[in-house]
Image (cartoon, rainbow, N blue to C red):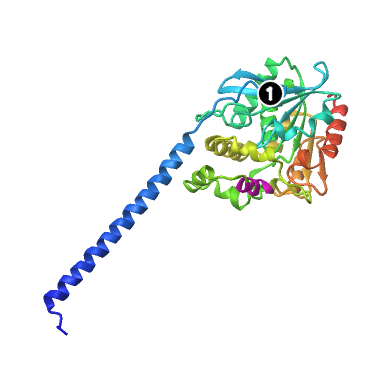
Amino acid sequence: MTKPTKTTERTRAEGRKRRWGRRQTLALAASLAVAGLLLGNAAVVSRQSAGADGTGRESGGSMLSLDGGNIHVREDGPRDAPALVLIHGFAASTRSWDALVPLLAGSHRVIRIDLLGHGRSAKPAGGGYTIPDQGRRVGAALDRLGVRSATLIGHSTGGSVATALAEQRPGLVTALALIGTGPRLDAFVSEGAVGNLLFTPVLGQLLWRLRTDGLIREAASTAFSRPGFEAPQAVVDDVRGMTYHAFTATSRAVEDYLTERPVPERLKPLGKPLLVIFGAGDRRWRPTSADDYHVVPGARVETLSGLGHSPNMEDPPRTAAVLLAFAAEHGG
């Protein structure tokens, strides 16, 4: 057997070095390519926008051309009855009230509005998602519908929007009912593991692009606590119908609104009748934080056992009974 010469060994070492260098270059190139694709996906997903979805008339709804884009509204019940305005929560739509509306519409004109970025309303890639902007837009929609006074009922983020409208136009608001609306930012519990990942830069956009019904349902599960209750398909469809920009911009808007000033402190000087409904098992906002609303003079706080963040969907009859009693007491 021939003994390798120093020249041969040096040649082999140089060959191994070149091969290692090529592998490193290829690995780096692959990493850069993946990073580029992720960043490119993040940019594309973040810039997505969408117009309003059709006329909505086939579902008893209509489109109103307002600042920022067309807004979808639905009406039920007698037009000459006292008005109840239902404002859905984050990543939801008018459909989140479907089971509740028949219980209210017998005695009230029930108006539902898809907030900008949600449901069948427009989803622009720009601004307009702040809570005050959303509140002002709800007021403009009511003006178009000829509503001079109304009881506002908001679920979660919808309660913050209702509060913003009451701050801007107290003469339009007869009373407010807030369902699962967090009073302040430090009362927030969690969006859940999947929900939190959706707000992670780059990874969030990737998950958004790859989202499945199962992933959405898992993220939405913290909105419910009633035993055996599963998120309706409408909840999944509402999230799927949003753009990533509308999703994250709305979340930031809520955070900004609560950071600036807690909801109870905003309502305290307005002198409006207030009903607060919380599920005892709320997994989004600490249920005991509902007590913060007692700083509002005359506020009525109802904690519903066996329910979570969404009593309007988890137990519509029980929720409707509380709402109707409150509306009747305050002229709605």
Tally the numbered discs. Answer: 1
190 in magenta: no
Q: Is residue 133 left or right of residue 171?
A: left
Residue named by callout 1: 73
The image position of residue 325, as x and y in percent, is 88, 32
Residue at left offset 73%, top offset 47% = 230
The image position of residue 273, as x and y in percent, is 80, 30
Residue at left offset 75%, top offset 36% = 178
Residue at left offset 76%, top offset 39% = 313
Q: Label 1: few (<14), some or many (≥20) within 10 Å?
A: many
Question: Quadrant where the N terminus lies?
Answer: bottom left
Question: Quadrant where the C terminus lies?
Answer: top right
| Residue 91 visible here | no
Residue placed farthest to the bottom in the image? 1
The image position of residue 119, as x and y in percent, is 63, 31
Numbered disc 1: secondary structure: strand
Name the residue type under label 1: Val
What type of secondary structure mainly makes up the magenta span? helix
Residue at left offset 64%, top offset 36% = 238
Magenta segment = 214-221
Question: Which of the 4 quarters of the picture holds residue 84?
Answer: top right
